[in-house]
Image (cartoon, grey):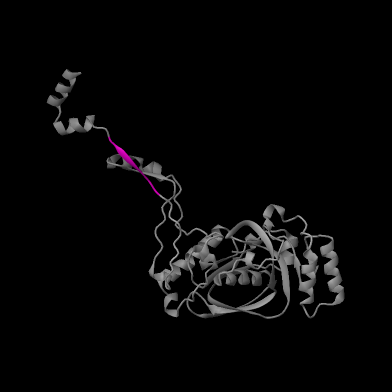
């Protein structure tokens, strides 16, 4: 062996010999997951979100650049992580903090436009019918909503009809102001992207008007009814730091697997209170509501509203 090594040193330059007998070393770096940022300052636009690395992946750095080049074709086959924010889940205090209004000067900025683009991407990827900026960790009064024919098509026809659910194009509303147009309300199971796997009954107005600014800073007014009205109320609640579980009908919170089970005993008194609060309800409608609840039927139909399991995640 000694003779071979001596011979190699005579035939080859010392630098080449060193490379041949040198072991390429690597060092591993574990990347820690980065949580979404919550900035307590008044203006969240001054603090851009940090770039999120893929949590839990061991990234290797090699002192040999040629090895990385040779592996480049293989690395290109891997799916790249889409650079969009994660949805903030219930339990995070930011979901209970009121958002602030966006100034007219801020609307046209690259930062706000990127926030809007990210919100649309997150909503469609989830998928959901709406999303508010606090749900991606941005305390600004911005909501996006969209309900397409394709998304609606996944719901049962009976549910679509009872929810008065109709498709509408993408809406971006900045600094929304909501006003009810009538005293009519409806009771439906409602879900949220920030409260995964659960539903609860929430009472919402059936007809509302929302005014605000679009993404170009121009005034916008939306007259909504049915399920679109529910989506808008749900998203505007997020801007006030309110989740649907803060407004849900008691004893109706359940997992999506249990949506078809009967309502809990005691909900009949709730039905009485709701119906009596509606001035235009007749005694016949009241009796009908009581009978329905006493039978513990999930679907309750009254003029004031109705309850039906929902497959739609709002936002």
- Vertical arrangement, residue 253 with respect to residue 213, above or below: above
Q: In the shown orientation, is residue 71 left or right of residue 236?
A: left
Residue at the spot x=18%, y=32% of the render? 16
Which is more toward the observer, 148 or 313? 313
Q: Quadrant of the N terminus?
A: top left
Name the residue: 67% across, 59% down: 199
User: Can residue 109 be seen?
Assistant: yes
> Which quadrant of the structure image shows residue 249?
bottom right
Image: magenta residue range: 24-31
Q: Position of residue 26 (x, y in %)?
A: 31, 39
The image shows residue 54 at horizontal and vertical percentages of: 43, 50
Q: Position of residue 211 (x, y in %)?
A: 57, 80
* 198 left or right, relative to 124: right
* Rendered image quadrant of residue 286: bottom right
Instruction: Identify the image quadrant of the C terminus.
Output: bottom right
Give the residue at the far left of this rendering: 10
Q: Residue at x 32, y 41 (%)?
A: 27
């Amino acid at each position: 062996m000694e003779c071979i090594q001596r011979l190699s040193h005579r035939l080859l330059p010392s630098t080449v010999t060193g490379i041949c007998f040198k072991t390429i070393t690597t060092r591993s770096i574990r990347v820690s997951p980065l949580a979404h940022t919550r900035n307590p300052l008044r203006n969240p636009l001054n603090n851009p979100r940090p770039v999120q690395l893929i949590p839990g992946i061991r990234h290797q750095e090699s002192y040999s650049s040629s090895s990385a080049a040779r592996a480049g074709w293989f690395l290109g086959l891997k799916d790249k992580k889409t650079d969009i924010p994660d949805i903030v889940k219930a339990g995070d205090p930011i979901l209970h903090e009121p958002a602030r209004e966006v100034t007219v000067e801020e609307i046209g900025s690259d930062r706000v436009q990127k926030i809007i683009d990210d919100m649309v991407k997150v909503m469609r990827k989830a998928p959901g019918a709406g999303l508010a900026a606090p749900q991606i960790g941005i305390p600004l009064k911005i909501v996006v909503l969209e309900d397409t024919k394709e998304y609606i098509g996944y719901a049962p026809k009976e549910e679509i009809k009872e929810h008065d659910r109709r498709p509408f194009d993408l809406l971006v509303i900045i600094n929304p102001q909501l006003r009810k147009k009538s005293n009519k309300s409806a009771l439906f199971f409602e879900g949220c992207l920030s409260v995964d796997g659960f539903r609860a009954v929430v009472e919402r107005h059936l007809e509302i008007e929302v005014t605000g600014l679009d993404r170009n800073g121009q005034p916008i007014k939306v007259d909504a009814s049915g399920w679109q009205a529910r989506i808008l109320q749900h998203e505007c609640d997020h801007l006030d730091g309110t989740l649907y579980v803060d407004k849900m009908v008691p004893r109706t919170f359940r997992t999506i697997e249990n949506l078809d089970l009967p309502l809990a005993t005691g909900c009949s008194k709730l039905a009485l209170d709701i119906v009596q609060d509606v001035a235009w309800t007749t005694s016949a409608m009241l009796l009908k509501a009581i009978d329905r609840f006493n039978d513990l039927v999930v679907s309750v139909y009254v003029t004031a509203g109705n309850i039906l399991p929902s497959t739609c995640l709002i936002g």
